[in-house]
Image (spheres, grey):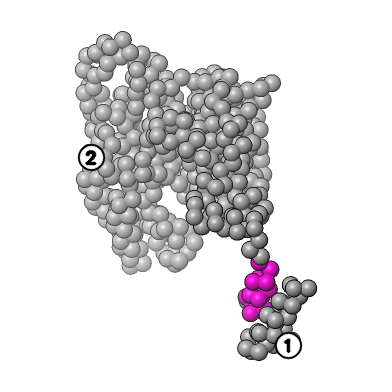
Amino acid sequence: MKRFATRCMLLASFLLTGLVSSTLPADDGGLSSHDVATLQESFRMDATTRLIYNAVTNGNVKDLALNRDVVQRDNSHYTHKIKTKGVTDQKSSGRCWLFASLNVLRPAVIEKHNLDGFEFSQCYLAFWDKMEKANCFLEYAIELGDRDPLDREVSLLLGQPFPDGGWWSHTVHLIEKYGVVPKSIMPETNSSSSTHSMNHIIGRKLKLDAIKLREMRLAGKSVEKMRVAKRKMLAEVYRMLVVNLGEPPKEFSWRYVDQDSKLSEAKTYTPQRFYKEWVGVDLGDYFILCSDPSNPYGKHYQVRHSRTLYDRDDPHYVNVAIDVLKRVAIKSLLDDEPVYFGADVSNDQDGEHGIMALDVYDYGTLFGIDLRMNKKQRLLSLEGAPGHAMVLIGVDLKDDKPVKWLVENSWGASRGNGGFWNLYDSCFDEHVYAVVVKKAYVPNKLLRILDQPATVLPPWHPMMVLFK
């Protein structure tokens, strides 16, 4: 009765002030004064809501939503682990793909050469990655120079002229072209560890260069003349990168101490020769499997403009159900081969405890609403996307089924369990989108799918996040 009286008073008040009429207007889609009154009337600050209100306004929402049951059930027991030494740290950069790729190769180098630890120079490959991205961006500026600047593809390219992101395939192309060096030969700098300012400044320069190339194209200049101008632009980018990252070596002298404290003799290498002698892995022996529920499985796909080296192809992948990703990953891990993978870490991961589990943050219960989405809904609504690359180095099996997966991250030893995460299998289902394994672990029928013509997805497809 009291609620009815309150409603009558509210309505009378709005009528007297002329905010609503006695006959409600037709719904035009706006938030009307009647809608506002209804919303206000629908809310009740009851005891439970007041408790949540006090907690949320005075505390950290993530701390309040942390699911204690998930944390208490967490453990670090694994039926199979690959031995690793040392944790890498990408710091304030988007180079997870590069760290993950090199971390896949690192254990074999340590074992092969009896080392107590080893790390590749991420800065070295990041330098050439940036040069290749600058060239790729300017080539796209030439290629698309006659389009409207607000064309969707042009806008996407201009929005990220010089990104940090990348993918396994890009690492492969960079190593094939430039080789690798030990970290001590080209160590991290402030700009490699915190890339925002460098990216912004060089990105602005590249946008100005794109404008100049567009003007040349509209003036009828030939591609040859535009490329002459492009090479001068790239020389300026090279200088800016050297100032930020140091100059990459053409050759270097290196010696090391092995696990038995024996010092090697100094030897001179080129980066390509160092890769052949120290790593020697055939990078063409790896295969990419993705699980994108927004597209049919059992098909060959590419995303247009996902390459970062202009003289290479856009990455290819085969789309399969998530259980296929698990099976090939388990085969690889049981053979002591680490697995590169791409996942969404914007949801259901806790960096303090090193947990990746569904509802590790129970926001739905905290706010009293249903926030559940399936994987396809998250992908197509841009609520979830495969934006982070890591390495699987262990699996916990029960009755030959995975319970959880051991993840080597590249966020340093101060996060997670000393730099490692426990990825629970139900979270794998929902948030893992891709794995990279050797072809020996992939069924032949899937390998043959790459012989089919690729379905090319547009560069605004959510799976582009996997590559950029």
What residue does disc 1 label? Answer: 22
Residue sitting at x 64%, y 71%: 40
User: Considering depth in this image, is 311 or 392 the residue closer to the camera?
Assistant: 392
**Residue kind at label 2, given as amino acid type:** Gly
Q: Point out residue 23 in the picture as x, y percentages from the top left corner.
A: 74, 86
- Is residue 335 rendered to the left or right of residue 4? left
Look at the numbered disc 2 and give the secondary structure of its residue: loop
Residue sitting at x 59%, y 24%: 396
Q: Main secondary structure of the magenta part?
A: helix
User: Considering depth in this image, is 218 or 137 the residue closer to the camera?
Assistant: 137
Q: Is residue 7 above or below residue 294?
A: below
User: Considering depth in this image, is 62 or 235 the residue closer to the camera?
Assistant: 62
Q: Point out residue 15 in the picture as x, y percentages from the top left corner.
A: 68, 87
Q: Residues within 10 Å of mark 1 (few under 14, many from 20)?
A: few
What residue does disc 2 label? Answer: 246
The stretch of residues the image draws in magenta is 31-43
Residue 228: tell me if it is visible. Answer: no
Q: Residues within 10 Å of mark 2 (few under 14, many from 20)?
A: some
Which of pointers 2 and 1 indicates the residue nearer the eye?
A: 1
**Residue kind at label 1, given as amino acid type:** Ser
Q: Quadrant of the N terminus?
A: bottom right
Q: Is residue 462 above or below residue 448?
A: below
Is residue 36 rendered magenta in the image? yes
- Is residue 101 rendered to the left or right of residue 342? left
Look at the numbered disc 1 and give the secondary structure of its residue: loop
**Residue 421: image tag:** none
